[in-house]
Image (cartoon, helix red, strand yellow):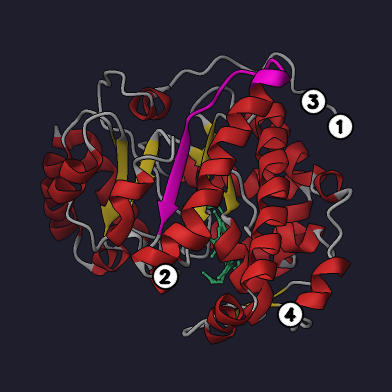
Amino acid sequence: MAFSNKSFPTLKNDRLIRAALGKEVDKVPVWVMRQAGRYLPEFQAVRARHDFFTVCQTPELACEVTLQPLRRYEHLDASIIFSDILVIPQALGMTVEMHPGLGPVFPKPLQDPSELDELKENGAISRLDYVGKAITLTRHRLEGKVPLIGFTGAPFTLMGYMIEGGGSKTMSKTKDWLEKYPKDVHRLLSLLTRVIIDYLVMQVESGAQLLQVFESSADHLTREQFIEVSSPYLKDIRNGVQKKLEEKKLEQVPMTIFAKGGGHSLDIQAKLGYETIGLDWTVDPIEAREIVGSDITLQGNLNPQDLYRTPEEIRKLTIDMVKKFGKHRYIANLGHGITPQTPLESMTAFTEAVHEAI
Ligand SMILES: Cc1c2[nH]c(c1CCC(=O)O)Cc1[nH]c(c(CCC(=O)O)c1C)Cc1[nH]c(c(CCC(=O)O)c1C)Cc1[nH]c(c(C)c1CCC(=O)O)C2
């Protein structure tokens, strides 16, 4: 590696970090989940030549696609390292393939709790070394333009993919495990939590400046189930990362929890120690603020579907949204990832409108 993680270029735009820490900002920071992705022709061009996980595993390629949206959209206030949440099951020894049009596929999902013993926890972090290398390279190539976000899937969401063998509308196998094998479920969630903590610390060591935890399958959980199988692990992750960063004498970084469909548990999320809570588009900004109080930053939450409207309509919806959230403790984003057919000019309209709103 030509670059080391020492002496990164000075950060010139720190709006994202300031907003996450509750400091004053000149403009509302904005970034977009899946901002490096298939709506960009330059991303499609890279994907035409390389398999999805090859892009993730090759620091030069991961860095290139991470930078692509920043070259096109001058108003973006953050970058997010190009990778996937499913690199953790891969590092535990499971095979994951990305099938175009279908999404992720595990040829051999977990079928029985006895298979948990085959997961390779030892050495998992060193098998994810390529993510650290991509982060370090990207921090240098960013030249301090905007901060770099690192991320992970949350334990329940990862467990769901490992049991279902891919995306699932019903998650019925996972729900079956919750009923039949509660002890093994907690064993697996604890294993994933340990790996996730070390993985996030490694990302910070490599140069990540903010960390986001994706609990994307929270929409399958009731509030009671969220309390049982999600929130304790999310809390352990927040505390564990803080403790290990202290031990390693590394600087603390702000963390975001995004639980899609977790609107039923915002009060619980507010007590987990995360600086920022990400909201999907079903949550009302004013109600969310009332629930979480004034000491937490909110992130979100335009409906990704709204990016199919005209630029004028997008501007209006975005300005209305930003005004509802207000300038303090707020990071503008979509309520979930940007979709592949989104017109390129919609991103311009959205990001510009955020900066002009207040
Ligand atoms: C659930 C989940 C996954 N991956 C991720 C989540 C959590 C966020 C969410 O809820 O959407 C996280 C993720 N995946 C990707 C990123 C990159 C960083 C970014 O720009 O946001 C991030 C942060 C790249 C990707 N991950 C994927 C793509 C598209 C695949 C391709 O290029 O062929 C990209 C750009 C594929 C992927 N990866 C995953 C699925 C279900 C799919 C298929 C569905 C889809 O295509 O949107 C698992």
Q: Which residue is mark 2?
A: 221
- Indicate the secondary structure of the residue bearing disc 1: loop
Q: Are marks 1 and 4 in contact (CB under 8 Å)?
A: no
Q: As shown in the figure, which amino acid type bears the numbered disc 3?
A: Phe
Q: Earlier in the sequence, mark 2 or mark 1?
A: 1
Point out the tag, 2 or 4, that comes first from the N-terminus: 4
Q: Which residue is tagged 3?
A: 3
| Residue 1 marker | 1
Quadrant for residue 49, please give it. bottom right
User: Distance of mark 2 from mark 1, alpha carbons?
Assistant: 43 Å
The image position of residue 101, as x and y in percent, is 57, 82
Q: Quadrant of ligand 1?
A: bottom right
Task: Mark yes or no: residue 333 visible.
Answer: no
Of residues 170 and 336, the one drawn nearer to the viewer in this rendering: 170
Q: Which residue is mark 4?
A: 109
Q: Give the extent of the magenta segment.
A: 246-259
Disc 3 to disc 1: CB gap under 8 Å: yes
In the displayed structure image, the side of residue 319 where residue 303 appears, left or right = right
Is residue 337 inside the magenta stretch?
Answer: no
Magenta stretch encompasses residue 258: yes
Q: Earlier in the sequence, mark 1 or mark 4?
A: 1
Q: Quadrant of the C terminus?
A: top left
